[in-house]
Amino acid sequence: MTTYVVATAGHVDHGKSTLVRALTGMEPDRWEEERRRGLTIDLGFAWTTLPSGREVSFVDVPGHERFIRNALAGLATVPVVCFVVAADEGWSAQSTDHRDAIAALGIRHGLIVVTKADRAPDLVATTIERARTEFANTGLRDAPAVAVSAVKGTGLDQLGQVLDDVLANMPAPDASSRLRLWIDRSFSVSGAGTVVTGTLIAGTLTKDDRLVVVGDRREPREVVVRALESRASPAEALRPMKRAAVNLRGVSAGDIRRGQALIAPGAWLMTPVVDVRRIGGAALNDVSEQLTVHVGTATVPARLRCFDAEHARITFDWPLPLIVGDRLLLRDPARHLVLGGVGVLDPDPPQLRRRGDGTRRGVALATMTSEGDVLAKVAGRGAVEVSYLRRINMGGPDTAPPPEVRELSGWWIHIPTYDEWQRRLRALVEHDAQLDQLTPGVSQGAARDALGTCAANFVDQLATDAGLEQHNGYIRLPRTRTNLGRAEIGVAKLEARLLASPFLAPLAGDLAALGLGVRELAAAERAQRILRLEGSVVLLPSAPERAIRALAQLPQPFTTSQARQALSTSRRVAIPLLEYLDGIGRTRRVDDDHREVVR
């Protein structure tokens, strides 16, 4: 059965620790000073099994305002909250702070527990009503409420049942996703070495895993999982949702601390800057430039550059493993106030160098969904690796490329940009040939330098798609075995015309104007300079492959009319081209009106 982790929240002295003690029979206050003062200072941990058999662990957080950082470290990694309000004191100052934190973190599962009901039974209903009012604009607006007396034991059975019901409605955690464990404790055990703990929300931890410790101004460090434990029991592997104790080899306890994270190597982007959207709280143009950001168990000084009331850029004092969709809590470091929450739209945003870039970036962010904008990311760079998009949570293994994007050798490429790269490469090669007709062509190195970083990855394919050829490391205009003589000028003009509009085949009169009759076209075809189809349709040899890429973007199967529109051409060209593609096995007829691309 799936295990669950629940965090407590609420004002100091409202009975959070007493409630956890009554439910689990365990002492959550770990320090002697906490027990002596009756005041929770740091995170506490306890666990039990509910009547249904569900295993639940509690992260007990301090309620005093002086320890808000510790409280946020507990709340930020747990998806379920048990919000405590004392009947005899009612809603109090830190009740509001913790409510704001819950709203900012986007916690949507939990329950309200009115404690000390025996002290003020006549105030229980009023306390519940006030709590519901306070949570009206948060994810806990519909949270169930229970009144208990932990001292007398009344209401605890009902609380267990309500908690069981809340957990039964939790979405199943993803054990197959990549690992990111935010560390909330680090200590050394005699004979075992360094042990860290945290709440495992997603992914699977396995003995002998190789992981990387990151964060807190420290250089990334590779470690090995020596042993695992949860709820005081050893394990070979841990799946979410569990409290995890991880015995590490390769790092001392003094070199790892709360706020760092264990991540799977190569699976996360470490980013020092993110673009965000306000989720709740203060408008971003009312937030000071210097602020404190809480994410996971990390507390990070940061700077905010506001684009508008809803969007901003946040620069951290050190890189963090963040993805699209992560929630960040913003806090005023001077007044210790929770300012609100933001969601990450882009964990690897473009640099802002020119005047007006900030305004334009704000407009771009306003059009993005909460999942980010894959097309904008690909278009902005021309091409990005699919593995990079997955690292930042823009698309999974089964995600299809968006319109105007094609996949090539593990990259997503912006088709208009790719076409522009072709034109630039063709112009470069033609210019070189005009300067010296005896030149072997443009070297691949020179082509990469001229086209830029992204395009450099596709020089071979670009040359093919641009109707060029490669020979001995050089890219050149196609050489012909047949001497085209005076037809060479007309063929070159035809190639340039078709390169600009690949599927607008010239009419017979246009060919005649270029001096290209039947004999000249036959010679050009033998030289593999053109492709002739039925109906006197003349295209470039690269046209079939270009057509397949465009047709693959259509809903399958497609009609001739849809194909014609996708290729921006006429029926005169579309029909013989589709019949040619049928003949070479790249498309096939489904019925009289429909075809589909052969995958």
Image (cartoon, rainbow, N blue to C red):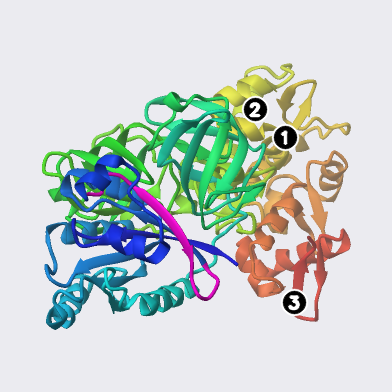
**Residue 158 visible:** yes
Q: Mark 3: which secondary structure?
A: strand
* Number of marks: 3
Instruction: Determine whether label 2 and label 3 are within 8 Å by CB.
Output: no
- Write down the region rendered in magenta: 39-54
Q: Secondary structure at mark 2?
A: helix
Is 61 situated above or below 432? Answer: below
Decide: few, some or many residues near mark 1? Use Cα within 10 Å; few <14, some 14-19, many ≥20: many
Q: Which residue in the protein does label 3 denote?
A: 594
Which mark sits nearer the N-terminus, 2 or 3?
A: 2
Going by the numbered disc 1, the residue's amino acid type is Leu
| In the displayed structure image, the side of residue 233 where residue 392 appears, left or right | left
Give the label, 1 or 3, closer to the camera: 3
Q: Residues within 10 Å of mark 3 (few under 14, many from 20)?
A: some
Which residue is at the front of the view, 339 or 18? 18
Type of residue at label 2? Answer: Val
Looking at the figure, which quarter contains the C terminus? Answer: bottom right
Quadrant into which the N terminus falls = bottom right
Q: Secondary structure at mark 1?
A: loop
Q: First in sequence: mark 2 or mark 1?
A: 2
> Main SS type for the magenta part?
loop
Residue 116 coordinates in the image, percent (x, y):
20, 71
For discs 2 and 3, the disc positioned in front in the rendered view: 3
Residue designated by label 2:
429
Please say if 35 is above or below 51.
above
Q: CA distance from mark 1 to mark 3?
A: 34 Å
For image coordinates 61% across by 30% down, the residue present is 456
- Above or below: residue 360 compared with residue 83: above
Q: Quadrant of residue 563?
A: bottom right
